[in-house]
Image: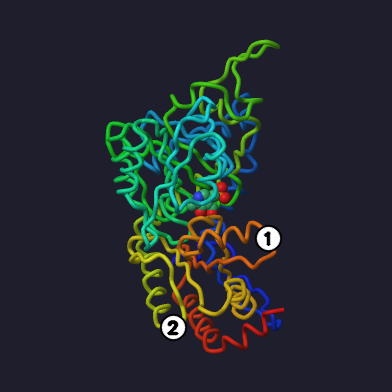
Amino acid sequence: MYRNLICGVDEKIPLKDGSLVTAINFDNAATTPPLKAVLQEIIDFSPWYSSIHRGTGYKSRLSSELYENSRNLILDFVKGGKENVVIYVKNTTEAINKLSFRLCDGVKKCVILSTDMEHHSNDIPWRDKYIVDYISINDKGSLSLEDLEKKLIYYNGSVKLVTVTGASNVTGIINPIYKIAILCHKYKTKILVDGAQLVPHHTINMGEISSPEHIDFLAFSAHKMYAPFGIGVLIGPKEVFMKGNPDFAGGGTVNIVTHDFISWNDPPEKEEAGSPNVIGVAALATSIRTLKKIGLDNISNYEEYLTYYTLNKLKEIPDILVYGDVPYNKRVGIIPFNILGIPHYITSQILSDEGGISIRNGCFCAQPYVQKLLKIPSEATKDFIENSSLPRPGMLRLSFGFYNEIYEIDKLISLLVKITINKNKYVNMYTH
Ligand SMILES: Cc1ncc(COP(=O)(O)O)c(C=O)c1O
């Protein structure tokens, strides 16, 4: 529907037999191709690009304006309250790492509640600085709000933050972030939403601080929203970043410096050490304008339709196992599955070699979640730890963008049917 907005969708790629086909990309949860409007903005803005903040030239002023005004555009896009600051970072991973330095005084005594369904980027950064506990999931892969409340009561006021993904990068499940926020605030803690998979696909409303369902912190990456130029954001209350030292120090972070004295700038400058990614900001701002023009509701409705269509088609193929049992309208356009009897890495290789179809396989940087969905006993995990050459368990993941089309899904489905019918032939062919 919006295919012509995206760069590269008509590129031909070679199959294993040397023939050329138009590439199909169902790996949008990993990263998205750029919008043409974003590329055009970079071309249009480049002649005006200059140093920001401290430059006095005309171009410097223009670049500084773009950089600063984009913070308002971003905050408005996620309906964040005025108390918040928008900090530019590289990506969601950097945003979460940055926040992880901010919530405690370095003594490992505060508790962070993460969940069983997080991307490693919303799990590992917390581990060395806090006591981390994980909110459990049910057998369908969804988060247990009962367990969240139980843990909030158990830790009795020492939970500094509940950190939860807005939508899972494995199952696509959309978490009830506003309900989670209400629980967090009831028990006097805060919530961080990892918006990497949610923000590009759904409206999100951080809300006013006075509302019990407001989101305290939000992180997301522009490369997952059609602007892959090295920018992301962390949004949160300014006062949280006023205290203490920044995680990275250097140019731009300071107000006054002598050899024995530093006074830090106020956030966001304090949190953005070094020369910033102004072109990246221009790209993100254009992506946001384009997504708004298309309409986030149109995007989610269309991607829901792609998901609904695909889930129904997959159900008709024997030996296909779909993980994470949630209806199409409670998830973003992500579908994890396997063909029984064929290792995930072989199926994904066949799809690429014989159909020019890119998907992802493995554990998608969410190993604990995938281990649970695959019901892998902990003894088996120990085997992988001890012997890193063992073939790893995993899944296949389809993930849609708003530019994908039904005819692309039909091509995938007919190849999957062919694979399931000729399982032995393919396994032999692809087992070296
Ligand atoms: C849910 C989730 N969180 C965090 C990340 C990390 O994002 P980035 O690689 O842009 O830092 C990803 C990336 O796939 C993700 O899917």
Does residue 55 appear anywhere in the picture? no
Q: Which mark is residue 388?
A: 1
Residue closest to the far front: 379
User: Relative to the observer, which residue lies in front, 403 or 143?
Assistant: 143
Residue located at (51% from left, 29% from top): 102
Secondary structure under the numbered disc 2 in the rendered image: loop
Q: Name the residue rendered at 50%, 61% in the picture.
A: 370
Left or right? Give the position of 198 relative to 297: right
Residue 95 in percent (x, y) is at: 53, 39
Q: Nearer the viewer, mark 2 or mark 1?
A: 1
Side of 16 relative to 89 (left or right) = right
* Rendered location of residue 54, percent (x, y): 62, 24
Can you see residue 72? yes
Which mark, by number, is residue 317?
A: 2
Residue at 47 percent of width and 76 percent of height: 409
On the image, the x and y values in percent for residue 201 come to 42, 56
Q: For the residues marked 2 and 1, what is the alpha-carbon distance in whole angstroms?
A: 33 Å
Crowd around label 1: few <14 · some 14–19 · many ≥20 (10 Å): few
* 308 lies above or below 259: below
Residue 82 or residue 100, whichever sits in front: 100
In the image, residue 260 sits, relative to residue 188, either above or below, namely: above
Color theme of the render: rainbow
Q: What residue type is disc 1 on? A: Ser
Q: Secondary structure at mark 1?
A: loop
Q: How many marks?
A: 2
Q: Position of residue 92 (x, y in %)?
A: 53, 45
431 w.r.t. 208: above or below: below
